Image (cartoon, grey):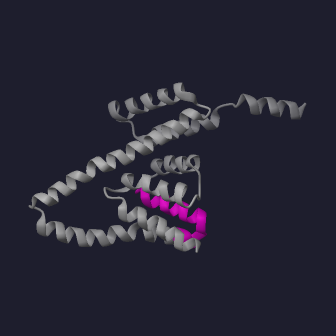
Amino acid sequence: MKHVHIFIAFFRSGILGYGGGPSSIPLVKKEVVDTFQWMDSDEFGDVLALGNALPGPIATKMAGYIGYRVGGILGMINALFASTLPTILLMIVLLNVLNTYKDEPWVRGMSMAVVPVVAVMLATLTWDFVKKSSTSSLGWGWTLLFVVVSLVLFELLNVHPAIIIFALLLSALLKKDPENSKEKEKTSA
């Protein structure tokens, strides 16, 4: 039954993720965190951050990892197949239809109408991450600082997101935790 759920989760996000990988991220989150509860929002955020730092399409990277985590090797293959099958089928069908009717106003209107919906989905996901970050140990001040600095680095200085994510991961690894240091001192004394 687990493999059926993996297929359903990634097929649904694959078939409804119009606009590519980034537009399917909120759909994957809905399935993985809310519907099937395979991980919580924090874990999903970690998977998303790491997935964005690695090369390749985000939707397939997330499907592969989450499928593996939930169902092992077969779960990974199942999730990858389920997330790519809708794209393959829709590309064949829709491109034939759209090429036939590409000059029709309803086709252009349909394509333009999808963009704001995807933008709202991504904005909602972003707000969820900002809220989660601000209520954690970071607080609103650090969260807003990271948002502003990241925005400046991305948009004004054209720094690749992977570089920023790698720098943050490295700084978190190298940062000394004062609470852990005190605990280690007590146990060694």
Please determine whether, in this image, residue 89 is positioned above or below residue 22.
below
> Quick check: 180 left or right of 146?
right
Please determine whether, in this image, residue 7 is positioned above or below residue 103.
below
> Quick check: 142 left or right of 151?
right
Going 29% across and 69% down the picture, which residue do you hit? 90
* Image coords of residue 136 (percent x, y): 60, 35
Q: Give the range drawn in magenta.
A: 56-77
> Quick check: 157 left or right of 82?
left
The image quarter containing residue 139 is top right
Please name whichever residue, 137 or 36, is drawn nearer the observer in this view of the structure.
36
Please name whichever residue, 157 or 82, is drawn nearer the observer in this view of the structure.
82
Residue most extreme to the left: 103
* Image coords of residue 66 (percent x, y): 54, 60
Going 38% across and 46% down the picture, which residue do you hit? 122
Asked if residue 112 is among those painted magenta in the image, a careful observer would answer no
In the picture, which quadrant includes the C terminus?
Answer: top right
Asked if residue 73 is among those painted magenta in the image, a careful observer would answer yes
Please name whichever residue, 159 or 35, is drawn nearer the observer in this view of the structure.
35
Going 59% across and 64% down the picture, which residue do you hit? 70
* Image coords of residue 178 (percent x, y): 73, 28
In the picture, which quadrant includes the N terminus?
Answer: bottom right
The image quarter containing residue 2 is bottom right
Residue most extreme to the top: 141
* Image coords of residue 55 (percent x, y): 43, 53
Q: Main secondary structure of the magenta part?
A: helix
> Quick check: 158 left or right of 52?
left
